[in-house]
Amino acid sequence: MKRRDFFKTSLIGAAGAAAFATDAVAIGHPVDNRKISDIPFPEKRPLITYSDRPPLLETPKEYFTCSHTPNDLFFVRWHMPDIPTHIDPAKFRINVDGEVEKKLSISLEELKNDFEPVTVSAVLQCGGNGRSAFKPTPGGIQWGNGAMGCAKWKGVRLRDILERAGLKPGAEWVGFNGEEKAAYYKTPNFVRELHLDEIGDHVIVAYEMNGEDLPYLNGYPLRLVIPGYYSDSWVKMLSRLTVTKEYQHLFFMDYAYRVPDNKTESQKPGEKVKTKPITKMNVKSVIGYPAPGAKLYHKSHVVVRGVAFDHGAGIRKVEISLDGGKSWEEAQLGEDAGRYAYRTFRYSFKPIAHGKMTIMSRATNHAGEVQPFAEDIGWNAGGYKYNGIDVVEVEVV
């Protein structure tokens, strides 16, 4: 598909959704009633669309009821406007250079046949997911709850690739770069770095997502998968690994995707504070059903359903409140798909009073971390790491 056709197909939907999002005002919890685009992107169903260049697509909240998110419903977040519209898998290579004994140029076929394949189910979540809940509104995409998804990723261990190249003495860092390019030549490339201590066996270079090739908009043909970390480090269309002895000062590591370096990771608007990169995700739950604004029948059988996750400690329980957080009851947890994956939950009840009703969900992980009330979350200039107790307002008729 030619570039002009690729982006033209979603232009109308993008403009409408972006305008709606700009005018939205959120107090306490993310805005979840944004318009879904009428025109889908390639390999995607119609999603909430913020931009077509770069593609920015959000998954509607109603789909967060299953342990894995279908590929055609998976959110999309690119940083640069210039992404390739065609990749020849026979010619594509991932290159390894820098402080290595042997430089590598590995084809997709070699990656799939010459290395041990591994799979991991893991949540991919944008660091700005839920940004629309913050007030005053921070800059950036005003995501609701849908800049996240969970998939079964298949690929090879990053460690295995580095071992094949061989690390020189003193090697400490690995930089990752993909194929997205800036429109202006002075704009820095989107490069992320990991210290070797951060690279466990769970960190992989993935070529499959839910049993299929990676969708083009989700980073085909390769993307870095770092379970438990926010998605800014999951580099798409991964094409180069550069090993270094020293940390390389880079824009997206040193200035973007950072929060205040203090106990609450918060600041006052306009206050300048020392910052640190966002890395591990915090504990969170999201209600997929019922949807905000839904009408429930009086004394009907209602099953609240949703998903919970964290950075890898694992979900211990999810609780539901029907009285504004005064009392809580445990929901039933679904099958454990792995400590980095969604843990589904369900809670049954019969609404006995007519009128407006608020349903809330709160997750607790095995590390004892509890999802907080929105008012207990401190503000930060980037609008990152929002994980307030989820709130869905419905009407009983």
Image (cartoon, grey):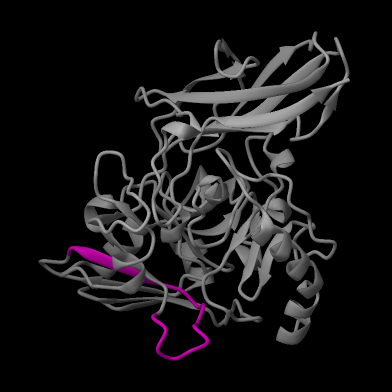
Q: Position of residue 81 (x, y in %)?
A: 57, 79
Q: Residue at x 20, y 74 (%)?
A: 99
Is 373 drawn above or below residue 88 in the view shown? above
Q: Residue 287 magenta-drawn? A: no
- Give the image quarter of residue 78: bottom right
Q: Quadrant of residue 350?
A: top right
Residue drawn at point x = 52 percent, y = 37 percent: 341
Q: Is residue 173 magenta?
A: yes
Q: Is residue 395 visible?
A: yes
Span colored in magenta: 172-188
Q: Position of residue 166 (x, y in %)?
A: 23, 67
Q: Quadrant of the N terminus?
A: bottom right
Q: Main secondary structure of the magenta part?
A: loop
Tell me, yes or no, if residue 338 can be seen here: no
Seen in the picture, residue 204 relative to 182 is either above or below; the reply is above
Picture coordinates of residue 329 (x, y %)?
A: 58, 10
Q: Position of residue 330 (x, y in %)?
A: 57, 12
Image quadrant in which the C terminus is located = top right
Depth check: 380 or 9 in front?
380
Say if 41 sits above or below 362 in the image: below
Left or right, residue 33 beside residue 127: right
